[in-house]
Amino acid sequence: MNTATKLSGFALGLAAVFGTAYGVGHLTDPVTPAAGTRHDATDAGHAGSATGHGDGAPGAAAAHLPGGLLVSDRGYTLQPVTAATGEFAFRITGPDGRPVTRYDVAHDKRMHLIVARRDLSGFRHVHPELAADGTWRVASPLAGPGAWRAYADFTPTGGEPLTLGVDVTVPGTLAERPLPAPATSTTVDGYTVTLTGAPEPGRSSRLTLTVSRDGRPVTDLQPYLGAYGHLVALRRGDLAYLHVHPEGAPGDGRTPAGPAVTFSAEVPSVGTYRLYLDFRHGDAVHTAEFTVVAGPQPPAPAPAVPTTATTTPTTTGVPTTTTAPTPEADHGSPGHGHS
């Protein structure tokens, strides 16, 4: 059963809640790193940041965490700023404290902004526009109330690729969405996407996503940001971020335009992940989503025993309340859903 949650906060123009150093969610799955794992692996053309926990300062810990967990790293800080209603705006400040205004192009864009609700629904991948004062602006991708994580994926000119993350709250009443169960096939916009392969913690894994429509393979995928597909993985719990791209490239003479798009991805730890595949066809971008488990399936939590409350008068005149298990309780867990 969905839980209705009342959220309050600033207006949408600046609905950002973030720590001075970093913001991470409560861990609901085990996220034990694989032995000997480096957590900075992505494709050679677009490395995700290997950011550290703590105050954002460079250090040994920074080399062992995936991207998106810090709001500040290597002297660069993600700062949401006041924006007009219906708009999202932010700046990246550099080691000198000033807004950064020069960025390298990576996959056809200087900035990739990715957002997802903390329940791993509502994923969006958009591309803001840079103003002369270093402010990035875009029509708000935050589609409805909730606690969101926003990721800025960029390369400052003269610096290393970085992924910074910040928590953002949109006020309103939220119906929390349970995470869909792991599956190897999903549908989106009339397309069926099938996943072959499974991520293995601490090593490169081949993941192949095959696109079909009306039972026929799609062999004319269109290039999108210099590729036939983009894959983002978010780890359930802390929403650690991994951004990878497929093998090959459009126009290289050997990479087919579908139906299969193959990725080499390395997840940083055992745990549950949500995969988001962006692909372009029919002059529109579509996003297919999967839940996958890396490593052993985490054990299901023991079901709570429903109780009934009984109020009993006492000699002091102050009633006391006791609880007891409800007989013949239904212990079935609610089904997964993602609308």
Image: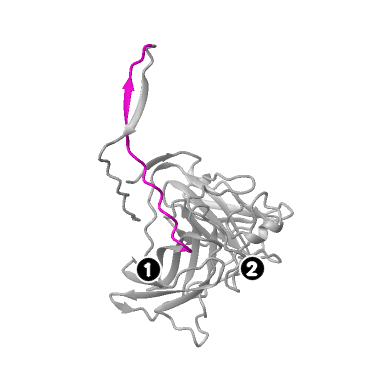
> With respect to residue 284, does 238 lie above or below?
above
Task: Give the Cα distance between marks 1 and 2.
Answer: 36 Å
- Marker disc for residue 104: 2
Q: Residue 308 in magenta?
A: yes
Which of the two marks, 1 or 2, is nearer to us in this view? 1
Main secondary structure type of the part rendered in magenta:
loop
Any part of residue 12 in sight: yes
What segment is highlighted magenta in the picture?
294-315
* Label located before the other in sequence (1 or 2): 2
- Measured as percent of width and height from the top left, residue 254 is found at 49, 87
- Marker disc for residue 34: none
Q: Residue 303 in magenta?
A: yes
| SS of the residue under disc 1 | loop
As rendered, which of 278 and 55 lies closer to the eye?
Answer: 55
Circles 1, 2 touching at the beta carbon (< 8 Å): no
Amino acid type at mark 2: Asp
- Marker disc for residue 184: 1
